């Protein structure tokens, strides 16, 4: 069994010898590279949207809608680093140094594109050089992304920090609610005390009225 290959034997092949040659095909590699390019563009667009601060003007008033990552220097740096790394030269064991040499480059809108024909031709004629470039370049990009998205990356640390802040806020809110409940009970007891005093004053006034022969109405 040879993984990734299909071998068809002729019906009259019994007892005969044959030479088997296996060559790499660029079709599957081109599809995988196209998927990588699309994922890269999706990631950059997502970061751009989340980092954006969008103005909206109504009359003479301008308001801004801030993305959830707006002002986050770390993720802004990640986006710029991804752009730079994909356009960098990489020293490796092969003769190819830049992704543009194998058909991967940016258009005028900073969107990554793939020239499938150029990539397939490079892979067909310089397979080891293409592999060396991809191993080096994409390896460094993967290390960069892992620094943000890995289990110990800044994104994980940010989420942990947010969870800790949320827990602290929940505790403070619970404390304030408990304090308000106790304050409410205290004020209610004071109110009841005043009510009892008013009733006592009424009884006292009635007693004085009886003693002095004066009719005093204490009903309010």
Image: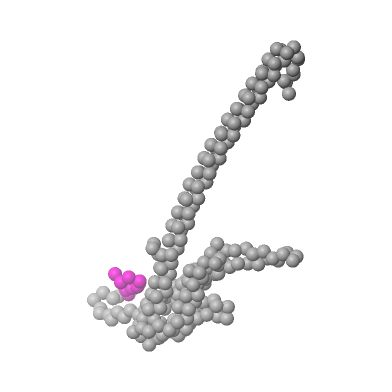
Magenta region, residue range = 1-11
In the rendered structure, does residue 8 fall within the stretch colored magenta?
Answer: yes
Q: Residue furthest left?
A: 15
Q: Where residue 55 appears, x then y in whole percent? A: 65, 67
In this rendering, does residue 31 appear at all?
no
What residue sits 62% from the left and 30% below the top?
A: 191
Q: Residue furthest bottom?
A: 95
Q: Where residue 6 appears, x then y in whole percent? A: 35, 72
Using the image as rendered, state which of residue 48 and residue 7 is in the foreground.
48
Dividing the picture into quarters, in which one does residue 151 lie? Answer: bottom left
Dividing the picture into quarters, in which one does residue 12 lie? Answer: bottom left
- Image quadrant containing the N terminus: bottom left
Q: Where residue 46 appears, x then y in whole percent? A: 53, 67
In the rendered structure, does residue 176 fall within the stretch colored magenta?
Answer: no
* Magenta stretch, main secondary structure class: loop
What residue sits 70% from the left and 12% below the top?
A: 211
In this rendering, does residue 74 appear at all?
yes
Drawn side of residue 195 relative to residue 9, left or right: right
- Vertical relation: 160 (above or below) 44: above
């Amino acid at each position: 069994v040879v993984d990734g290959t299909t071998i068809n034997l002729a019906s009259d092949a019994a007892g005969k010898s044959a030479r088997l040659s296996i060559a790499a095909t660029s079709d599957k590699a081109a599809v995988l590279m196209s998927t990588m390019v699309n994922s890269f563009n999706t990631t950059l667009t997502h970061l751009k949207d989340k980092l954006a601060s969008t103005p909206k003007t109504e009359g003479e008033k301008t308001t801004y809608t801030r993305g959830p990552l707006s002002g986050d220097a770390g993720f802004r740096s990640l986006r710029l680093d991804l752009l730079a790394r994909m356009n960098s030269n990489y020293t490796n064991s092969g003769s190819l140094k830049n992704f543009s040499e194998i058909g991967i480059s940016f258009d005028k809108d900073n969107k990554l594109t793939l020239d499938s024909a150029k990539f397939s031709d490079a892979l067909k004629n310089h397979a080891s050089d293409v592999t060396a470039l991809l191993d080096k370049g994409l390896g460094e990009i993967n290390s960069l992304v892992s620094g943000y998205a890995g289990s110990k990356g800044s994104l994980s640390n940010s989420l942990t920090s947010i969870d800790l802040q949320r827990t602290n806020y929940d505790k403070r809110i619970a404390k304030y609610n408990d304090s308000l409940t106790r304050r409410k009970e205290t004020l209610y007891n004071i109110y009841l005390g005043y009510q009892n005093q008013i009733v006592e004053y009424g009884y006292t006034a009635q007693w004085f009225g009886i003693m002095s022969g004066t009719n005093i109405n204490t009903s309010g």
